[in-house]
Image (tube, rainbow, N blue to C red):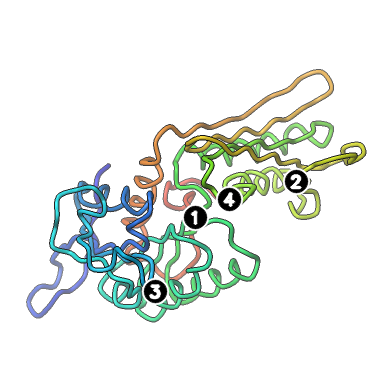
Amino acid sequence: MTGVAVRRTVGPGTEGVTMATRIGVAGVGGRMGRLLVAEILRTPGATLAGGTVRPGGALIGQDVGRIAGLEPMGLPATDDITALAARADVLIDFTHADALEANLAAATAARTALVLGTTGLTADQEQAVAAAARAIPVVHAANFAPAVNVMLGLVRQAAAALGPEYDIEILEMHHRQKVDAPSGTAIALGRAAASGRGVVLESVMESGRHGHTGRRADGAIGFAALRGGQVVGEHSVIFAGAVEHITIGHRSFDRRIYAEGALRAALWVAGRAPGLYGMLDVLGMERP
């Protein structure tokens, strides 16, 4: 991936000097955080501004490079998200919904762009993200893998073309540690399908069937969530007609693809106007 540097004035007589985009990582102790650190360090045009760890945790003060499984780099991890946001051009957050309020507040106060990949947000938290995007540029996506975002477009088109006589079922599988279900990507796929049919997902969603549920509701979009092992991510959208089925699917084999996509988003969003963006904007694809 080619890095894209952001232009900013760094002092008298330096107007027009191209500087690397300073990227802060919230949650460097997590799997995604460690991947993001490695990806930033190997990408031209990007520089690591620092990283945070869980407040009060044992990793505070430890070298970010060592936390990521790399050579030490003389950059201690901190639990001060406000200080990190202040010294970064872009903050990447793949932590937990519980940390969203503090991370949004820090990015907004510092006028720092935000790349948000945290899933399992409530409706109120989604509204908080939209409110923050009125002050800062935010890239918010359920999945940062480029092919998944192509899949979203295909699902929307298929739902519109096939019509309500085709039942839609969404199947996803993730590693056993994942705490939210259905996954954020599965919900995004459901919304894409609902958009293709001109309906709101929440009005047609069926999830977690168990026991004597009765017949499938006409027009429903069903969800099934599997958990086990260390599956990175698998998603399938099944369009089941009376005499034919079609399945649109995606498999991730390495979490690095999410880090690559998030870094691509970070380099893209640096210096943008405030607004709520998605990976379709980053990829230059038309929004529905």
Between the C-alphas of marks 1 and 4, the distance is: 14 Å
N-terminal of the pair, mark 4 or mark 2, is 4
Q: Is residue 151 left or right of residue 25?
A: right
Q: What residue do we see at 63% from left, 37% from top?
A: 226
**Mark drawn on residue 184:** 4
Residue for badge 3: 107
Answer yes or no: do the residues labelled 4 and 3 have beta carbons within 8 Å? no
Which circle marks residue 278 in the picture? 1
Amino acid type at image mark 3:
Ala
Q: Nearer the viewer, mark 3 or mark 2?
A: 2
Secondary element type, mark 4: helix
Q: Which of the marked residues, 2 or 1, is nearer the chain's N terminus?
A: 2
Find the distance from the CA under tag 1 to the CA under tag 3. 18 Å
Helix or strand or loop: what does disc 2 sit on? strand
**Marks 4/3: CA–CA distance:** 22 Å
Q: Could you tell me which secondary element the residue under label 3 belongs to? A: helix
Establish if 3 lies above or below 174. below
Give the residue displayed 29% in from the left and 72% down from the top: 84
Up/down of 251 relative to 189, above or below: above
Disc on the earlier residue, 1 or 4 = 4
Q: Identify residue for label 2.
A: 207
- Residue type (three-letter) at the residue carrying disc 4: Gly
